[in-house]
Amino acid sequence: MRTDRTALVTIFAIVVAGSAIRLAAPHEFEFKADEARMVDLVRDARATGELPWLGMATSQGARNPGMSVWPFVALSYVFGSDGFGLTQSVRVLNVLALAAAAAFGWWRLRGADRHLWLAGVLLAAVNPMEVVLQRKLWAQSILPIFAVLILWLWIDRKKSWAHAAGLGAVAAIVAQIHPSGMFVVAALFAGALWDRHRRDLRWGAAALGFAALAWPLLFWVRHVIDMATGATTGGSLPMSLDTWLLNVVSFRYVHLLLSNVAGVAMRHSLGTHFAAFVAQPVVFVAHAVLIVIALVAIGRWLLRRCPVSADELKPLLVWGLLGTGILMTAAGVFVQRHYYLGLFPLPYVAFALVLRGNESWMPVYVVAALQLVVSAAFLMFIHANGGAPGAEFGLLP
């Protein structure tokens, strides 16, 4: 009972800390071309009464599926259809994602799995890159709550017809909110097929749940085919062989993942302002210590032949995190930092596993404290600097 009380207090502290840093400074948010385009799409949908079949364009030229916009249309009736209101809806959804992740650890997991999961949620709650992306008006920024649901349902996929149907339905949503979610869904599907007890899953129910919500994806598939065949102009599909090979051998999925979870990736948002940010003594020390701890932990984990002290979480880590990385790398995807949002909070569960090293949870707590310092310092820097003009974050609106 004492362990349960400790876990409950830990859950409460995680959710409070993560919620506070996501909801803080509500008027200080990113608002550039992509965010403005999302506002336009939402307002057009409300004005015409018709949901769009395609969303905004990706960095590759192809447009996102229409479901990347639909949740924001629904949220606009609660939070408003302007940039400020829609941005707040993203923050609130991600507070709910944190609560859902904590609930998963409390109700579904036991023993070592519970401790490992909660340690990962703690790291995810305070991680600087998560804080930035989970305060941003992007379709992919609302993936975390659906990621928690799909991971939960995947573990329980054999329990009942309803669990299987729910897994299929949530998979359809994740695949349509952002293309990166398609790789997550494909990896988990591969894991379910590989399972020696695969027949225990009600495949018909899962297929029915998927089909019920995946049919709008047909419009996106047609759009991609038109781009690939040249029927639609303005895109960069398909990629050249040289580009594909470069994306494969660069292993971006691995090194971006490592810098993300270590909490030292703020150059992504700050650009040329990063030097001024890290020049602050507290921030500099935090970065230096985080780098040392991460390198030592990873080295120790590799020398011990990559132990995975987890039971039910092991398949999630293997098929969800590793499987998605293998698929993205093999496909030659130019991985972006926000692609990991569809796996929330798995990257941080894996990092907690590496940090602990089967010995002590203290490195996890130290890293979490340092990343909380970096996250808070980032928000204060953005406030004082008026944003990050010319960089990814841009000017404050």
Image: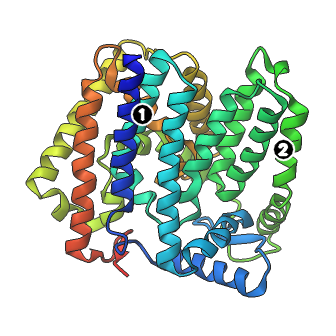
7 or 27, which is in the foreground?
7
148 or 316, which is in the foreground?
148
Residue 261 is situated, as x and y percent measured from the top left of the image, at 37, 41
Q: Quadrant of the C terminus?
A: bottom left
Q: Is residue 246 visible?
A: no
Left or right: 206 as drawn, with respect to 87: right
Name the image quarter holding residue 292. top left
Name the image quarter holding residue 298. top left
18 or 144, which is in the foreground?
18
SS for dot 1 = helix
- At 44% from the left and 14% from the top, the residue drawn is 307
Left or right: 195 as drawn, with respect to 127: right
Judged from this view, the residue extending furthest toward the bottom is 47
For marks 1 and 2 on the same chain, the one whose residue lies earlier in the sequence: 1
* Residue 209: mark in rendering: 2
- At 72% from the left and 46% from the top, the residue drawn is 170
Alpha-carbon span between mark 1 and mark 2: 30 Å
User: In this rendering, is residue 216 above or below 325?
Assistant: below
Amino acid, disc 1: Gly
* Residue 120: mark in rendering: 1
Q: Is residue 315 visible?
A: yes
Left or right: 8 as drawn, with respect to 218: left
Residue 325 is situated, as x and y percent measured from the top left of the image, at 57, 38
